[in-house]
Image (cartoon, helix red, strand yellow):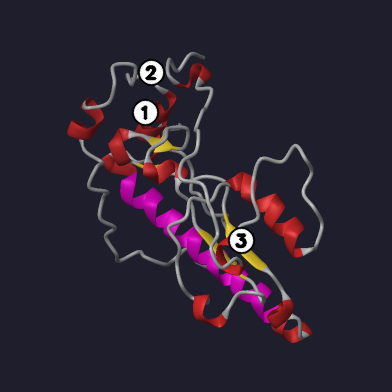
């Protein structure tokens, strides 16, 4: 019988399934009852992100699921390494624009919630790594605090191919941040999400 616990995030044949078995992953500092109770009134027990918390990152399940996420991240790291090795084998690695990112962040129990949807830093902040052969050497390996958005990805890829972005595109070419001497960049952005039944948890 199903106990309400979601199955593993990893495929059954994962080569990383044995990793982190003897490791205890610390829970996030904000994964407390106090942080859950500090949320606005409409965060109730019927909230979908709260309901899924019970099945994924409630303390009884936290170690199993967070370790599976770590294992999945290690799988991704391995595959990225394979792609880079193939680019080097083909002799095009130093002439290839590489962009590594994801579609959204995830709450892993922070504030008593899971997944995305809400504008917490854990939800809206995602990794973005760019290796561009046009990038000045002094900027390679550095980090930037500029606010980039997923709508910037298409203009960035098009710009690398010398293709002008379509007029309806809202984003900007991220390469401006490292190719322009004095780039002007956004200082804020608007975030909106239609929560729908996520607040009420209606079936």
Give the residue pinned by disc 1.
Answer: 50
Mark 3 or mark 2, which is nearer to you?
Answer: 3
Asked if residue 13 shows in the view, the reply is: no
Please say if the residues under marks 1 and 3 sit with CB atoms less than 8 Å apart. no
Give the residue pinned by disc 2.
Answer: 46
Q: Look at 46% across and 72% down and name the residue there.
A: 142
Q: Residues within 10 Å of mark 1 (few under 14, many from 20)?
A: many
User: Mark 3 or mark 1, which is nearer the start of the sequence?
Assistant: 1
Read off the magenta span: 62-86
Q: Residues within 10 Å of mark 2 (few under 14, many from 20)?
A: some
Q: Look at 46% across and 61% down and name the residue there.
A: 71
Please say if the residues under marks 1 and 2 sit with CB atoms less than 8 Å apart. yes
Disc 3 to disc 2, C-alpha distance: 44 Å
Q: Is residue 106 magenta?
A: no
Q: Look at 70% across and 84% down and name the residue there.
A: 88
Q: Which percent across, then down, holds residue 105?
A: 47, 46
């Amino acid at each position: 019988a199903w106990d309400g616990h979601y199955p593993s995030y990893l495929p059954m044949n994962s080569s990383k399934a044995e990793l982190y078995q003897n490791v205890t992953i610390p829970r996030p500092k904000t994964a407390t009852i106090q942080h859950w109770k500090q949320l606005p009134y409409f965060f109730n027990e019927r909230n979908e992100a709260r309901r899924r918390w019970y099945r994924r990152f409630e303390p009884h399940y936290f170690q199993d699921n967070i370790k599976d996420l770590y294992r999945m991240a290690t799988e991704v790291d391995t595959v990225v390494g394979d792609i880079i090795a193939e680019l080097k084998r083909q002799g095009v690695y130093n002439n290839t624009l590489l962009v590594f990112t994801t579609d959204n962040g995830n709450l892993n129990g922070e504030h008593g919630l899971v997944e995305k949807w809400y504008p917490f830093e854990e939800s809206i902040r995602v990794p973005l790594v760019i290796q561009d052969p046009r990038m000045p050497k002094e900027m390679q390996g550095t980090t930037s605090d500029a606010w980039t958005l997923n709508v910037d990805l298409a203009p960035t890829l098009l710009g690398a191919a010398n293709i002008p972005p379509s007029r309806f595109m809202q984003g900007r070419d991220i390469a401006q941040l490292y190719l322009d001497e004095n780039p002007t960049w956004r200082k804020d952005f608007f975030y909106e999400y239609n929560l729908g039944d996520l607040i009420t948890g209606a079936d």
